[in-house]
Image (cartoon, grey):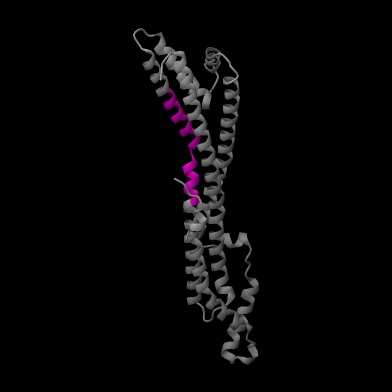
Amino acid sequence: MRVRSFLARSPLTRGVSGIVASCLPTLALAQAAESLPTESLPAELAAPAAGAAPAVVGHNLDLFNLILHASLPVQIVMGLLVLGSIASWMIIFRKKSVLDAARSSADTFEERFWSGADLAALFRDATEKDREISGIEAIFEAGFREFARLRQKRGVDARTQLEGAQRAMRAELAREVDGLEHNLEFLANVGSISPYVGLFGTVWGIMISFQGLANVKEATIATVAPGISEALIATAMGLFAAIPAVWAYNRYSTRVDRLNVRYEAFAEEFSSILQRQAHIDD
């Protein structure tokens, strides 16, 4: 699963543009109505127009008030997006430390392994009490342990010993890669779903704006601005949650793939060493 270039392919931008474009005629009429001098209007129309001016001044469109006074569905949408963003950032930082540690561990062990160290000594170091191992070292430990166990048994030929070691290394490699990929699917889900959750908040905010227009005698900026503003905030929050998650998913998936290649290459090279030790001809 990959979500590369997701935002470029998403219909979110076209959807929001269409919704906002549909509101432009209403906004234009409202702005034109406000620009008319009240002296040129009949007496029965001048009073409502004059009374609408304080509403424009009195409306506070700062971010906190818009979120605080947004409709309940939009507040729920914003809350979900905030929670998703916080969770994704926690995973981003945690996964970075895990992948950095895996790369450092692989570099350290491979340097010792290819420096000509004794395999038995490396195995003793890997199986020390209260010492956690991972990555390439865990693959080496699993393969060498199975190879040594089968070699001590009577009646087990050299090829069976090698095949057992290879199976053990493949199983350990799969576990290591699965651990590295843990929670990456959450980042993919946040990156995929958040823009649409934000779009839902946008649609709901536009609906609230039109409902407000239905209950007033004349359309003004003060009538539609709060609903459209909260709608755009929901869209922005959806993008704020999605963009880092998509970037982190693509970045970390690439790093996991590279580590997987290193693990597989080491398993093949170590199999060749065990094959020579078991005196197996190709």
- Name the residue rendered at 58%, 15% in the picture: 117
Instruction: Name the residue furthest left.
Output: 155
Residue 234 in the image: x percent, y percent? 53, 59
Please state which of residues 154 and 71 is positioned toward the viewer in this rendering: 154
Vertical placement of residue 222 versus 47, above or below: above
The stretch drawn in magenta includes residue 184: yes
| Rendered-image quadrant of the C terminus | top left
Residue 129 in the image: x percent, y percent? 54, 15
Q: Is residue 155 left or right of residue 3?
A: left
| Rendered-image quadrant of the N terminus | top left
- Name the residue rendered at 47%, 33% in the picture: 177
Q: How many marks?
A: 0
Residue 91 in the image: x percent, y percent? 54, 41
Residue 179 in the image: x percent, y percent? 48, 33
Please state which of residues 104 and 31 is positioned toward the viewer in this rendering: 104
Please state which of residues 76 and 94 is positioned toward the viewer in this rendering: 94
**Residue 47 falls in image quadrant:** bottom right
The stretch drawn in magenta includes residue 169: yes
Q: Is residue 186 visible?
A: yes
Q: Is residue 134 visible?
A: no
Q: Which residues are magenta?
A: 168-191
Vertical placement of residue 14 versus 106, above or below: below
Vertical placement of residue 259 versus 123, above or below: below
Q: Is residue 7 left or right of residue 59?
A: left
Provide the major secondary structure of the magenta segment: helix
Instruction: Name the residue furthest front.
Output: 282
